Each structure stands twice: as structure tokens, then as C-alpha cells.
């Protein structure tokens, strides 16, 4: 059962554009929502994470928007660059020692 | 800070042999480590959760006798693929939680180990 649904599966944007990746979750007990960036042949790297007590969090060019009532959260990448081309995964977990539940990933290509 | 290493980064072995993959938290102590498997162009699939000093908890469908996990210290977990077969070829990634972190939910991933079984 897919507990975190991620879309789109792939995304192509022009350099400088703002790609938006969306995730929806079902389990209302989730209270930790990170985003990871993965380059081919590498492990995922934590980009940014949010908890349900805030609706938005920004770190550098990366912003998470969180809508608790809709059970959705999204990643925005400002001023995207070719170096941002990677696969992005959203995830969710319940506070404590529970494993992350990952979305299926979005392959982003930023073209010059 | 919060660096996780894996060794080896890649390994090629013959069918029937066993392969051990190490996961180390270099600058922090990890209460919990996780092992994932990833197929090309797919998401990460959790295999097992490993807590220091106790038995690993395996996800449904993961053979515990085939994928042996040992978490002997707060900085080291190992995954041994026993009697490997070509279908075990995959990208194996570990992650660790930093017990010092203000957020005990933060997971840091290793660089992964590419296993190819001939």
C-alpha cells in the first residue's frame, strides 16, 4: 500500500524555472516530512524537512509548503540550475524511531 | 557532521558466495540504522531496521536468513548477503539516526553499495 503518493514521476524545466513536486499522504499520524535528493549511483541526501506545526519552511533555494488539512506537502526549487537535475524523494514518518515511508520519486531535469 | 559511510562502494561476486557490507556513522552515534534496497529508477525499499545490541526487525517478504544484519556498536551495522544469487544484484543503502540531533527523526544516508552477482 502506497502511503505517500508523489507526483509527477518526471519533470523537465528550463534553467531559472521553479519546479514543484507534490506529495500526498494518508496516515494522519505522520508528523515528520523530509525531502531527499539523489544523484545516480549515490545515496539520498537530506535537503529539507518540515513538521506539521508550520505551513512553510525555506532553506536556500528549497521551500517546503505543507497543507495539513489536505494532507499534502510540496517542494519548490527556486531559480533551478542544471546541477539540480536529480531524483527527488519525499518521505514521511511518525515521531520516534519509526522508518521513513518514501514516495516513488521524481526525476527532475533542468535544461539550460 | 552527520556522515555515514559504506564499504565497499561496489562489489562483484560469484553466485553462491556471501558478501558483507559495512555501514558506519563517522561522527555521531546512531541509535538506529536502516537498510534499504533500490532497483534502477525505483524508490528505496526498506529491508530492515537495526537497533544497537538487539535483533534486527525485518520487513515483510525479506528473508532474515539470507540478509543477516548485525548492529554490534553505535557506529557500525553490517549487512551480509548469504549465498548470493543474480536476483540479489541491487543497490544497497544504509541510513542512520543521530541520537545527538535535536530531531531524532533525521536520517542520514550512506553513499550506497552496488552489488553485482554473476
Image (tube, rainbow, N blue to C red):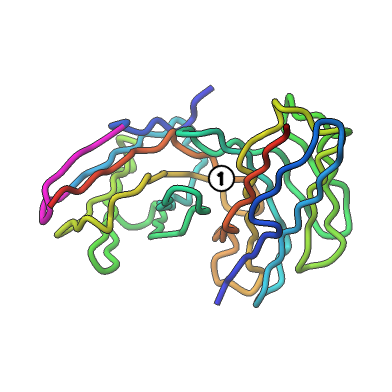
Where residue A41 appears, x then y in whole percent? 50, 49
Magenta stretch: residue A11 in it? yes
Seen in the picture, residue B22 relative to B67 is either above or below; the reply is below
Q: Residue at x 29, y 38 (%)?
A: A22
Q: Quadrant of residue B84?
A: top right
Judge from the rendering whether residue B56 lies leftward or rightward of residue A108; answer left or right: right
Q: Residue at x 40, y 37 (%)?
A: A105
Q: Residue at x 78, y 58 (%)?
A: B77
At label 1, counting other C-alpha atoms closer than 10 Å, the crowd grade (few under 14, some 14-19, many 20 or more) is many
Q: Chain of mark 1?
A: A
Q: Quadrant of residue B22?
A: bottom right
The number of numbered badges drawn on the structure is 1
Judge from the rendering whether residue B30 lies leftward or rightward of residue A102; answer left or right: right
**Magenta residues (range):** A10-18
Where residue A66 appears, x then y in whole percent? 30, 48
Instruction: Locate the N terminus of chain A and report the quarter of the image it occupies.
Output: top right
Magenta stretch: residue B79 in it? no
To which residue does mark 1 refer?
Answer: A100
Callout 1 secondary element: loop
- Nearest the viewer among A66 and B37 is B37
Seen in the picture, residue A64 relative to B4 is either above or below; the reply is above
Where residue B43 appears, x then y in whole percent? 49, 36
Where residue A71 appears, x then y in whole percent? 35, 36
Judge from the rendering whether residue B80 lies leftward or rightward of residue A60; answer left or right: right
- Nearest the viewer among B52 and A12 is A12
Q: Residue at x 18, y 56 (%)?
A: A80
Amino acid at each position: 500500500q502506497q502511503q505517500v503518493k508523489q507526483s509527477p514521476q518526471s519533470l523537465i524545466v528550463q534553467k531559472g524555472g521553479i519546479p514543484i513536486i507534490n506529495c500526498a499522504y494518508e496516515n494522519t499520524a505522520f508528523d515528520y516530512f523530509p525531502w531527499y535528493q539523489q544523484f545516480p549511483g549515490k545515496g539520498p541526501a537530506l535537503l529539507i524537512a518540515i513538521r506539521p506545526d508550520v505551513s512553510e519552511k525555506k532553506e536556500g533555494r528549497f521551500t517546503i509548503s505543507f497543507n495539513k488539512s489536505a494532507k499534502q506537502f510540496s517542494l519548490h526549487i527556486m531559480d533551478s540550475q542544471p546541477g539540480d537535475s536529480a531524483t527527488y524523494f519525499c518521505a514521511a514518518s511518525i515521531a520516534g524511531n519509526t522508518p521513513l515511508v518514501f514516495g516513488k520519486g521524481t526525476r527532475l531535469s533542468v535544461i539550460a | 557532521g552527520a556522515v555515514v559511510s559504506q564499504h565497499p562502494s561496489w562489489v562483484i561476486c560469484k553466485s553462491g558466495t556471501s558478501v558483507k557490507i559495512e555501514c558506519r556513522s563517522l561522527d555521531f552515534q546512531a541509535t538506529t540504522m536502516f537498510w534499504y534496497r533500490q532497483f534502477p529508477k525505483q524508490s528505496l525499499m526498506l529491508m530492515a531496521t537495526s537497533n544497537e545490541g538487539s535483533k534486527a526487525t525485518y520487513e515483510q517478504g525479506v528473508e532474515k536468513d539470507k540478509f543477516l544484519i548485525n548492529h554490534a556498536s553505535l557506529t557500525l551495522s553490517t549487512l551480509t548477503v548469504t549465498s548470493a544469487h543474480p536476483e540479489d544484484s541491487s543497490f544497497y543503502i544504509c541510513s542512520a539516526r543521530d541520537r545527538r540531533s535535536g530531531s531524532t527523526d533525521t536520517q542520514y544516508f550512506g553513499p550506497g553499495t552496488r552489488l553485482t552477482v554473476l
